[in-house]
Image (cartoon, grey):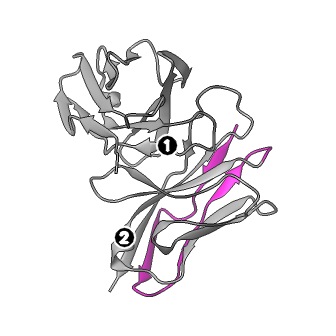
Amino acid sequence: AQSVTQLGSHVSVSEGALVLLRCNYSSSVPPYLFWYVQYPNQGLQLLLKYTSAATLVKGINGFEAEFKKSETSFHLTKPSAHMSDAAEYFCAVSDRNYGGATNKLIFGTGTLLAVQP
Amino acid sequence: EPEVTQTPSHQVTQMGQEVILRCVPISNHLYFYWYRQILGQKVEFLVSFYNNEISEKSEIFDDQFSVERPDGSNFTLKIRSTKLEDSAMYFCASTQGGGGRSTQYFGPGTRLTVL
């Protein structure tokens, strides 16, 4: 069964510092991978997704993630944190080989990012 | 920009009562999902729906749950007899295409509190 693990339920960085949120997946076949962000009292918003051979994926708001098959990882980074980046971030996976009409997402436990002034 | 909407934003109910959570997916989307997130836990898949039938469901989605697309715009989740453990945030999502690479667009959620 597929799963994702997010290391660190809480991450705190200073404004302007590098943001690194970790995600490792477990799957026999490289899956599709997603990062979603949830701001307070809002729904989940897609930041970026990995669905093809391009291993470095750029998303919205200056975020990017690199798919590393050898490490089964899909860590999210941003060179310089802004106060507005404070939110909860979820890594998710879906099955590349699933043959059904729909394809559920399997989420990690989330990482709450705090940005200190 | 089109978005998924959900009503109500917060629902409080007594144990054993029926609740209906409503979602309006993005208008040209064809695939629909419900997820839930119990406080402090991960977001969990409940059910997916396509072509007027359930496509996939999780172990959580037992006989107490049902989904319906009563008209061309709404997608509902019904819980027949709520339990304390049904207290959670419920998210609706929709996609235009099927398959795992399609982006799922999420609504803001309904917080269900069962007393």
Choose mark 1 or mark 2, whichever is in front: 1
Q: How far from the left and from the top, in percent, is residue A48? A: 55, 59
Q: Chain of mark 1?
A: B
Q: Residue at x 29, y 39 (%)?
A: B5
What amino acid is labelled 2 in the image?
Answer: Ala
Q: Which quadrant holds residue A56?
A: bottom right
How many numbered marks have been drawn onto this rendered protein structure?
A: 2
What amino acid is labelled 1 in the image?
Answer: Gln
Which one is nearer the viewer's eye here, A67 or B18? Answer: A67
Bounds of the magenta segment? A1-29
**In terms of secondary structure, where does tag 2 sit?**
loop
Q: How far from the left and from the top, in percent, is residue A99? A: 71, 28
**In terms of secondary structure, where does tag 1 sit?**
loop
Which one is nearer the viewer's eye here, B26 or A78? Answer: B26
Establish if B107 lies above or below B75: below
Q: Chain of mark 2?
A: A
Establish if B99 lies above or below A68: above
Q: Is residue B111 visible?
A: no
User: Does residue B22 show up magenta in the picture?
Assistant: no
Q: How far from the left and from the top, in percent, is residue A71? A: 77, 63
Tell me if label 1 and label 2 are in contact, CB under 8 Å. no
Q: Residue at x 34, y 45 (%)?
A: B3
**Residue that numbered label 2 is attached to:** A86
